[in-house]
C-alpha cells in the first residue's frame, strides 16, 4: 500500500502543523516532498498560501532560506494589538491586592507556570529581542525556567540553566560570586563546563529584575567561558533603580510600586516596545 | 476596509497554526468564524480535512467537544515508528562514553535543555500517561522543569514547581522532609500554599528516578495539600532497585548500568510502551 496522495488543503494542514510544532526549525522541502508524496513545486505554492495567510493575520512568518542546505521555517508572531491586550490583561491580573506578600514582594509564580500565559510572554520576548547572533538562551534557576525555555524554543536555541548550588550530575563547573540586588547578600552562580562552549554568544531571559545584580553576575560568569551576553529580556523590572547594574535590558512590564500596607500595586506595560519598529525579532 | 475573505486552504493554514500553537486548548468555532470571516459550517468541513490529514500521518488528533461551551482542540501525536526511532537515537546519544561523570553519574543536561529533544520526550509522556483527571503537572526543581513544562503545555495544564529551599517570593509554604534515594540524606521539599488548590489531582513529571525517594516525598507533600499524585512519568529510571519507593512510574528509558572505569553505559528503551494499546493518552 503506497502513501496516499494528499490534496492541497491537506498538504497545507500537514506542513502548517509540523512547522508550527517546531518553531524556527528549518525543514527542507525534500523532506515534505517525501512525506506528502508531492512535487516540491506544488509544496512551494502551498507554502506561499500559508505565508500569505499567517502574515495577513499577523500570527506567523514563513521564512525561506535559499541555497544548499536551504529550506523553510515558521516563526510564530503575535499581532501588535494582541500584544497590547495581553500586557493590559497581565497588568490587571498582577495588580490584584491578594498578590502582595510580606516584604512587599509580588506572587506571580502561577502566571509564569501557566502554558498559555508563558507562551504569549515568550512570543513577545522572541519578537522584541534580537536572537540572530545568539547561540544559547541562558537563565538562572528556578522560577524563570519555563519562560526562558519557551523563548529558547521559539527561536530554536538550546537553553543553559545556571544553578545556585553545585550538583554531582553537572560534572565540572565554573562558579562566580555576585551581590544580589534585592537582598545585598553575596550569592553563588554555577554553570557546568559542558553547558555552553567557549566563545558562545547568549541572550539572558529571566522573570524579574530589580537591581540587576543577577544579570551582572551572569556577565561575569559568561566571561569565565569567554562567552558574551548579547542582550537581556525579562518579564518585569522595577522602575527603580533606573541605573541597573546589568546594563541594557528589555522588560515587558515595569513594576512601579508595591504598597504592602494598602495592597496597592502599580504596574505599567513597557510602551517603548510599541514605538517605532515592530521589534528586532530576527532569528 | 473589511476583513479579507480567506480561501479554504488559507482558513486551514490559519486554524491549523493557531490550534497547533496552543496544544489541547479548546477553541470555539465562533471565534474562528469571526477571525476568518467564514461560516461555522464551512469551518467544520475545513477541520474535518485537517483531522483526516493529521490522523493519516499520525501527527495529531483533532478532538471535538460538543454541547454548550463546546469547541475543538488539537493534540499533537508522535507516530509509533517515530517514537521508536527517537528512543533509539536517544539511547545511542546517552550511551556515549564522554557522558560518564565521577561517581557513575551521567551528563544529559544538554538533552533536556534542547527544544526539539524536549518536545519529543514531552510528546511521548503526554501520550503514554493519562492526564484526563489531572488538574496540575508537578515537578521538583531544576533539571526536569523544561520537560515538565513542555508536558504540561501539551496537555494544557498548569505546572507547579516544588522547591528545595524556601523563597520570599512564594509566600506561605508547606514543606516535607524526605530521604533521597540516591544519597540517603534527608532533604526538604517546599511548595507555596498558593501553587495548587486543596484536593488537586496531579501527575508528576521528572527527568530521572533512582530509588523513588523524591517521588515518595512528592506523595507526602501532596497529602499535606489533600492532593493526590495520579501517576508519575520520567525520562529515565534505573532498573535497580526494581521496587521503587514511588509506586508505579512510567519511564521512556531504563538505565541498566554505568561503568565508571570503562565508560560503558547500558540503556534500553522501555519496550512496554509499545506493547498493546498505543497509550492512554486521553486529555
Image: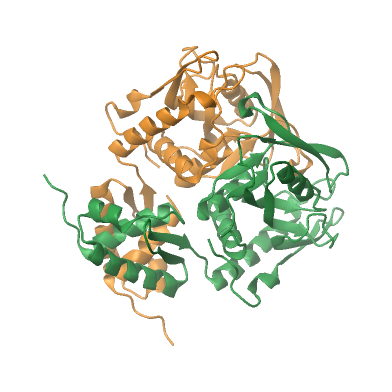
Chain colours: A green, B orange
- Name the residue: 31% across, 72% down: B39
**Where is residue B192, by image quadrant?**
top right
- As drawn, B121 above or below A105: above
The answer to whether residue B95 of the structure is visible from this angle is: yes
| Left or right of residue A36: residue B283 | right
Nearer to us in this view, B222 or A78: A78
The answer to whether residue A57 is above or below residue B272 is: below
Is A282 in front, or is B33?
Answer: A282
Question: Which quadrant is home to the C terminus of chain B?
Answer: top left
Among all residues in the image, which is located at the extreme left? A1
Q: Is residue A105 above or below residue A129?
A: above
Q: For this view, does A260 lie left or right of residue B60? A: right
Tally the marks: 0
Residue A39: x percent and y percent?
Answer: 21, 61
Q: Residue at x 37, y 55 (%)?
A: A27
Q: Position of residue B176 (x, y in %)?
A: 69, 24
Q: Is residue B51 visible?
A: no
**A117 is higher (above) or lower (below) than B141:** below
| Left or right placement of residue A210 versus residue B31 in this view | right
Residue sitting at 38 percent across and 48 percent down?
B75
Residue depicted at x 37% and y 24%: B270
Amino acid at each position: 500500500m503506497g502513501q496516499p496522495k494528499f490534496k492541497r488543503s491537506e498538504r497545507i494542514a500537514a506542513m502548517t502543523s509540523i512547522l508550527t510544532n517546531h518553531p524556527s526549525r528549518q525543514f527542507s522541502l525534500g523532506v515534505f516532498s517525501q512525506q506528502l508524496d508531492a512535487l516540491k513545486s506544488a509544496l512551494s505554492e502551498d507554502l506561499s498560501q500559508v505565508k500569505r495567510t499567517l502574515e495577513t493575520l499577523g500570527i506567523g512568518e514563513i521564512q525561506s532560506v535559499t541555497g544548499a542546505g536551504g529550506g523553510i521555517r515558521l516563526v510564530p508572531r503575535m499581532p501588535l494589538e494582541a500584544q497590547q491586550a495581553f500586557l493590559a490583561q497581565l497588568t490587571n491580573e498582577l495588580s490584584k491586592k491578594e498578590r502582595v506578600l510580606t516584604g512587599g514582594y509580588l506572587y506571580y509564580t502561577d502566571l509564569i507556570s501557566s502554558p498559555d500565559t508563558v507562551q504569549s510572554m515568550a512570543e513577545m520576548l522572541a519578537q522584541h529581542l534580537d536572537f540572530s547572533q545568539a547561540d544559547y538562551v541562558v537563565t538562572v534557576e528556578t522560577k524563570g525556567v519555563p519562560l526562558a525555555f519557551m523563548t529558547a524554543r521559539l527561536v530554536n536555541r538550546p537553553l543553559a540553566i545556571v544553578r545556585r548550588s553545585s550538583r554531582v550530575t553537572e560534572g565540572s563547573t565554573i562558579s562566580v560570586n555576585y551581590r544580589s540586588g534585592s537582598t545585598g547578600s553575596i550569592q553563588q552562580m554555577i554553570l557546568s563546563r559542558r553547558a555552553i562552549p567557549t566563545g558562545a554568544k547568549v541572550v539572558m531571559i529571566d522573570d524579574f529584575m530589580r537591581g540587576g545584580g543577577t544579570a551582572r553576575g551572569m556577565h561575569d560568569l559568561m566571561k569565565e567561558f569567554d562567552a558574551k551576553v548579547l542582550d537581556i529580556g525579562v518579564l518585569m523590572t522595577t522602575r527603580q533603580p533606573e541605573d541597573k547594574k546589568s546594563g541594557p535590558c528589555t522588560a515587558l512590564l515595569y513594576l512601579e510600586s508595591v504598597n504592602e500596607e494598602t495592597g496597592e500595586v502599580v504596574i505599567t506595560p513597557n510602551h517603548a516596545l510599541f514605538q517605532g519598529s515592530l521589534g528586532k525579532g530576527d532569528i
